[in-house]
Structures are given as C-alpha cells and as structure tokens.
Image (cartoon, rainbow, N blue to C red):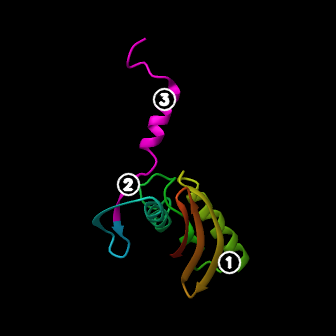
Amino acid sequence: MFPFDLEDEEIDAEELEEETEKQEYEVDIETGKLTGRMISGIEAVKQWLTIALAIDRYKYTQYSWENGSELSTLIGQGYEKDYVDSEVERMISEVAELNDDITDVSDFSITFEGDRLTISFKMSTVYGEEDMTVNV
C-alpha cells in the first residue's frame, strides 16, 4: 500500500548485495603501519586472520577475550609434538570460527625450530583458498 513498505525478502536481498565484499585498510604486517590502500576479498580475510593470530589472547585489555590466540603459550613448555600439533589446530580453528568469511582451515604443517613455532595451513574462504604461514 505504501511505497516504502517492502517485503522482508526484498530487504534481505538488498542487504546481501551490499555486504558481499567488505573493504579494510591494508596494514603492512612488518611495520604495523597502514599503507593507505584498501583491500577486500581474500586479501582482507588473510590480513584479519594474520592479525588475530598475532595478538596474544587475554594479554591486552583493549581487546575482548574473543580476540587473539594462545599460540605463544605452547612455546618453551616442553610439550610433546603430538600435543602441540593438536593444540595448534584447535587454536587456529577457534580463531577462524570468529570470521564468517572463513569456511575451513586444514592441511596443517607445524615445525619447531628453537623458540620459533612455524605453522603452515590452507585457509578456505567464501572468496577462495589461500595458503598461509604464521610464525610465533
């Protein structure tokens, strides 16, 4: 009856079209500074996951307890490799579940070299797949 009276289905379709690809400011991971570029799609998701895994969970009060990871707690504890492997997979999967654009993380390869933990895995997103490597 009224021209602004839209059906719920029409509203949902319009909202989905607007939210398909979010844009983020690009961060230079080496320096921690903004580059001035905007990124979207799989680049933005990869950057989000890289930053989320680099933040120590429960350490910084400016982040909620949902943000960050506990990967650094595995270093220097003398844990067995099987335990570390399973904990790394669990921790990364928990962080990835926080982002709706990430559909799966798989194919983990985990190595310890001294006090450095190197993790390689495949991240599947709604935009495609990407190989990632994280150093802790």
Closest to the observer, 11 or 33: 11
Q: x, y percentage for residue 93?
A: 62, 61
Q: Is residue 113 above or below residue 102?
A: below
Q: Nearer the viewer, residue 101 or 8?
A: 8
- Asked whether residue 130 is in view, the answer is yes
Dot 3: within a 10 Å radius of its alpha carbon, few (fewer than 14), some, or many (20 or more) residues? few
Residue at 51% in and 25% down: 8
Q: Which residue is mark 1?
A: 79
Q: Which residue is mark 3?
A: 10
SS state under label 3: helix
Q: Secondary structure at mark 2?
A: strand
Looking at the rendering, in which quadrant would you find the N terminus? top left
Callout 1–callout 3 Cβ contact below 8 Å:
no
Which one is in front in this view, the residue at disc 3 or the one at disc 2? Answer: 3
Residue 80 visible in the current orientation: no
Q: On residue 23, which mark appears? A: 2
Q: CA distance from mark 2 to mark 1?
A: 40 Å
Total numbered circles: 3
